[in-house]
Image: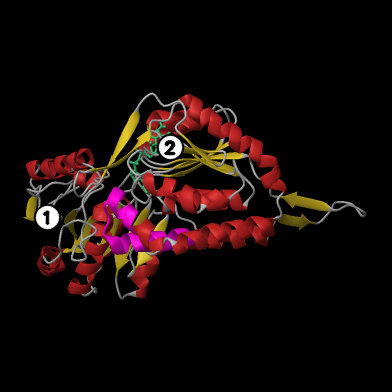
Amino acid sequence: MKSHFINGRFTSGHAQSEITVHNPATEEVLDSVPLGAAEDVDDAVKAAAAAFDEWKRTPAVARAEMLHEVSRKMREHAEEIARLLTLEEGKPLPENEEETQWTYSTFDYYAELGRHSRGRVIPSPEAGQLSLVLKEPYGVAACIVPWNYPLLLMAWKVAPALAAGNTVVIKPSEMTPLTTLRLCEIAFDGMPPGVVNVVIGDGATGAALAAHPDVPVVAFTGSLSTGQKIASVAAPMMKKTHFELGGKDAFVVAEDADPELAAKAVAYAALINAGQVCTSTERVYVPKQMAGAFADAIVDHVRSLNLGDGLDPQTDVGPMIDPKYREKVVSHVEDAVRRGARILTGGKIPSRRGAFYEPTILVGVNHSMKIMTEETFGPAIPLMTYGDFEEAIRLANDSIYGLGACLYTSDAKKARLFFEEVKAGTIWINDPLTDNYAGPFAG
Ligand code: NAD
């Protein structure tokens, strides 16, 4: 059984029970971890609080060196880490090689950013004064992470927090704790004790961490409903919060787009990580006159993709994380069909072990259906037709979500209109789901 990592040491802590971690492609048990109790959270927060003063006073250059060292050690073990990610999360290995690379690059990026600026000098109201605006670390940052990008989303919280002089307590998802624990053995072990702590557990463990009175800042990525729970605890305590929540991203294909090329782009944006990306394409809008050509192109392409174990080099689309998450996809597809949608391909659970669901394309959908309004978070691609581009923009904006949106076009005017009119945090034109550390990532 693996353990928590508190104050630079592994400890099984106060756990009364354990969590088993499964390979989603085979349903085999990979390992077990303790189910962290409130006492474990308290121990980790105490260790992080005790380490804070010294870490805060450590010169930014020295902090940067240690963060670069985390990156260097990850690089040394990149192959092993990517493989372990595939075992516990399911994405095809090449996607996890990318996640591993993004993760160590994130540590390098924030290592340098932390050296860059401490604040600014502002003009003083009177002669003989010097007025400074100083950026100060908060103290202990809680970093609560989901399962779909277990390392990258951890790094997006931990690396900036550490670079700015905070200490951290990480709570990985109960479904994917193993890669974070492996990093404690090979990379975080070189940090001063207490600066990085990892408590394993479920929602109750995360709730205890978010509510801890000695945690002034909570960084969370996960579902909207969990974000709402954390916000309701954090608000009365006046904690600083940083949320990255769910989405229902639209992909608009403009009438000038090449249907074959756009079909591949849509399939990529909808099926990467089996559709389990917060910015996955979840609804597609295609011009009426292109509907047939586009549907044929995307069906042909999707049928050519191999569904399988992420360790198999032939695999294009891996399993979902867990059969319980697949139930939501099944219910969204059933709801759509009940209301008049038609399945062009997929729509079934394959007869094999693992949390697989066939990549599914639906037509005849509309905004009365869950598949067009609620986060599906799986390999389903609903295609809806539109008349003119203004209607496409109106449909893209007809959502309670606003995380991201994609457009395929060769018309600069349409691209500009899309940027200006679509209410989404990140907009991709002709290049879906690319990342840039230097920019924000949020709705
Ligand atoms: P989740 O909200 O169920 O869990 C996320 C984390 O929060 C886990 O570590 C979980 O144990 C913990 N948690 C659960 N209840 C808690 C509580 N009451 N208090 C504190 N912590 C609690 O989400 P998930 O199923 O792991 O991840 C999928 C969701 O994450 C999707 O909705 C997806 O859109 C979202 N997501 C968003 C982004 C983004 O950047 N916006 C990125 C990836 C995933």
Q: Position of residue 78 (x, y in %)?
A: 41, 62
Which quadrant would residue 237 be assigned to in this image? top right
Residue 104 tag number: none
| Residue extent of the magenta highlight | 83-104
Residue at the location (21% across, 65% down)? Answer: 313
Which quadrant would residue 17 be assigned to in this image? top left
217 or 236: nearer the eye? 217
Q: Position of residue 232 (x, y in %)?
A: 47, 29
Q: Dominant secondary structure of the magenta stretch?
A: helix
| Pointer 1 local density, CA inside 10 Å: few below 14, some 14–19, many at least 20 | many
Is residue 162 at all visible to an observer of this figure?
yes
> Horizontally, is 386 left or right of 220 in the view?
left
Task: Give amino acid for label 2.
Answer: Ser
Q: Position of residue 178 (x, y in %)?
A: 37, 45
Task: Give amino acid for label 1.
Answer: Val
Q: Residue furthest right?
A: 128
Which quadrant would residue 139 be assigned to in this image? top right
> Horizontally, is 214 left or right of 353 in the view?
right
Query: Is residue 98 shown in magenta?
Result: yes
Q: Which residue is mark 1?
A: 363
Q: Which residue is mark 2?
A: 3
Residue at the location (14% across, 42% down)? Answer: 330
> Horizontally, is 192 left or right of 386 in the view?
right
Is residue 110 at all visible to an observer of this figure?
no
Badge count: 2
Figure quadrant of the N terminus: top left
Query: What secondary structure is found at the residue carrying circle 2?
Result: loop
Image quarter for ligand 1: top left
